[in-house]
Every structure is written in structure tokens, then in C-alpha cells.
Image (tube, rainbow, N blue to C red):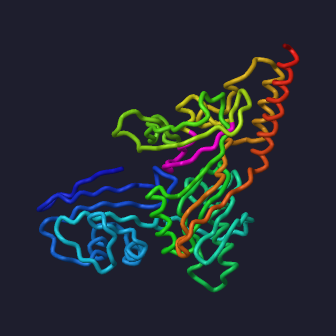
Amino acid sequence: MHKNTISGDAAIAIEKSDVQEESGELFEHFRFVVDKKQSQLRIDKYLMAKIEHASRNRIQNSAHAGNILVNDVVIKPNYKVKPLDIISIVLAYPPRDTEVYPENIPIAVVYEDRDIMVVNKPPGMVVHPGHGNFTGTLQNALLYHLQQNNPGDPDAKPYLVHRIDKDTSGILLIAKNELAQTKIAKQFFDHTIDRTYTALVWGNLANEEGTIDANIGRDIRNRLVQAVYDEADKGRRAVTHYKVLERFGYVTLVECRLETGRTHQIRIHFKHIGHPLFNDESYGGAEILKGTTFTRYKQFVQNCFKLIPRQALHAKSLGFMHPSEKKLIYFDSEYPDDLAMVIEKWRHYSAARTVNSENEK
């Protein structure tokens, strides 16, 4: 979290989470301490003056969603700020500068209503344009889908609330209007979204379950990847809970439950504890890290790498409070073909090793 101080008659403290660079969760959080000489002013006008590019509509949506707190109490849109008030606001992530054009790309829609969509993203698809990927993204496909189903509606567009890596498959939630986006953003901020991932990792984990609690930040040597930092002032706190689903000897299938949603969180956390994700090139998992020196084994692993030419990570499930119906809903997904085939190959290999070991006794 970045902290800055604006000088004046009294200090105004500001904290802001820059999610564009540091997180898979798409929201902005600001915290202000009102100057002791501030005259009473409607909170929307106060915040418009303090937050760059924040429209009145965005701020009012945050107020209607219960995303503005003053002195830890949710306030109404007509609240007037007072000296030394402590204001906290969570804003839905603003539209990106990159122009997005609709593209007729098939997408797997798991659920859709007037407020939200849930889709199952395939591996290899970027979530939104940027960084050299300006076409062929999920956002392009979503825009086409919504425009086709809502002809003539200029507001028919996707509002992103989170993202997963290009080569990670699985469940993604999308809002269909700004108020729904704002309400969901608050759930991500409050860590009330229930998310599970399935990962295939190298090695045989010592425990059946555990928690990885380690700060994550951009690697100073390579800005494309993350690193774990012991220093409290470096990186941001990240927490991953895991439990073993199945053991295959040289690799382990695990379920990961995210408490936070940092970029590459699961990938760098498991590298940190010595169990990189299977075939994760960025974090050292694209080599044979465990097993025998036999040629047949090496060929088996190489065949597995060819089956799943990406990190073995899938966003399995997602649970959240529906933004307008006020009920908890939950979605689960099947493994994509590449991950399912690799799991089955390791299952057969592990079973064959067990049989051979028994025969040798």
C-alpha cells in the first residue's frame, strides 16, 4: 500500500492500493483524514476534489453500495464531511485507457443475469487488452456477447472485477453494470469472496494442509515476475491456504483457498516453500525437479509438459454475495482437458510405481 502526505494547514493522510500493477483484484481503495479546518461539504464533492478522475457517478455508486465509511460507519450519499473525519472508500476499477472492440470469440458462459456473468476462461486467453495483447482477449469476447444480446444498448459492456493469468484457466466473475461492479469490489476488498484453485505442484508436501503467509512484490531483478520479501515494508501481505487432494509421489495435487488476491500469488508462494507449480516456466517448475534419473521417467515428464504447456493451475470455484439479490451463490468448474489428462497420467504412473514396489518386496 502506497502512502503519501499532502501538506497544508493540517496533514491529510492518504492511502491508496494501486491494483493495476499489484493485484488480480480490480478495485481502488483510498483513505483520507479530513483537514481540521475543512468546512462542511457534501462527501461526493469532497471526494471528487481528492481523487483524480473520480466522477460523481462513481462516487455515488460507491455510497449506494455501502463502500464509503466515515469513522468506520457506512454513510449516506448526502453526508457532509467534518474536520478530522476518517474517510475510507472502495471504488470500482475505472475503465482502461485501451480501446476495446467487440470480437466474435466463443466463450463458456456458466451463468448470466441482468447484473453479472460467470465464465470459464480457457488457458491461453488474456483477460483484458494491454501489454502487447490488444485483440483476442476475454474482454473483447464479452463485449461482443453483450452487444449481440442487447442490440442498441450503449451501456451493454463488461465491468471487470478481477482477473487471472493468461495461462491459468477457470472461473471468472464479471459485472454488467457499474453498481454491481462496485458492490462486488467491496467484497474483494473485505476478503469475503470464496475462491478455490487447483494446482499440481512438484514434490510430496510434508503436511496434509497448511497456510503460506508471505509478502509479495515485484521482483526488482525482473519486473515480469513476483518475489517474496521478508521485510515488512516490501511487498504486500499475501495469504494462501492449501490442502492436499491427491499424492502422486513426485508431484502433488492441491486445493488452494485465497485469502488475498495478489498477482501470481499461488505460483510464487509454492515456489517459496520449495514446491513450484508443474510446468511453471516463470517460477522454476518447467524442469524435472523430483523423480528418478531413468530415461523412461524423463520421457514421461516431457510428455506431460507437452500435454499441458503452461502452469498447472485452474480457478476451480467462486462463491460470493449476489450484488442485487442479496444471496450467496457458488459456482464450480470442471478441469480443462489439458489438466485433466495430466492428472490422469500421473495417477496411472503413481499406481504403477506402487504395484512395482509391492512386487519387488
Front-most of 47 and 356?
Answer: 356
Is residue 172 found left or right of 344 in the rendered image?
Answer: left
Front-most of 260 and 137?
Answer: 260
Name which residue lies at 54% across and 66% down: 321
Name which residue lies at 47% across and 69% down: 183
- Give the answer, above or below, for where 84 lies relative to 294: below
Q: Is residue 262 magenta?
A: yes
- Give the answer, above or below, for where 27 lies relative to 355: below
Is residue 289 found left or right of 85 in the rendered image?
Answer: right
- Give the answer, above or below, for where 11 lies relative to 100: above
**Residue at the far top in the pictured view:** 361
Magenta span: 253-267
Name which residue lies at 82% across and 30% down: 351
Query: Which image quarter holds the C terminus?
Result: top right
Residue 93's x, y, as percent? 46, 64
Is residue 91 found left or right of 83 in the rendered image?
Answer: right
Residue 151's x, y, as percent? 66, 84
Residue 12's x, y, as percent? 21, 60
**Residue at the far right in the pictured view:** 359
The answer to which image quadrant residue 7 occupies is bottom left
**Residue at the far bottom in the pictured view:** 152
Front-most of 90 and 306?
Answer: 90
Is residue 134 found left or right of 221 in the rendered image?
Answer: right
The answer to which image quadrant residue 342 occupies is top right
Residue 40's x, y, as percent? 18, 76
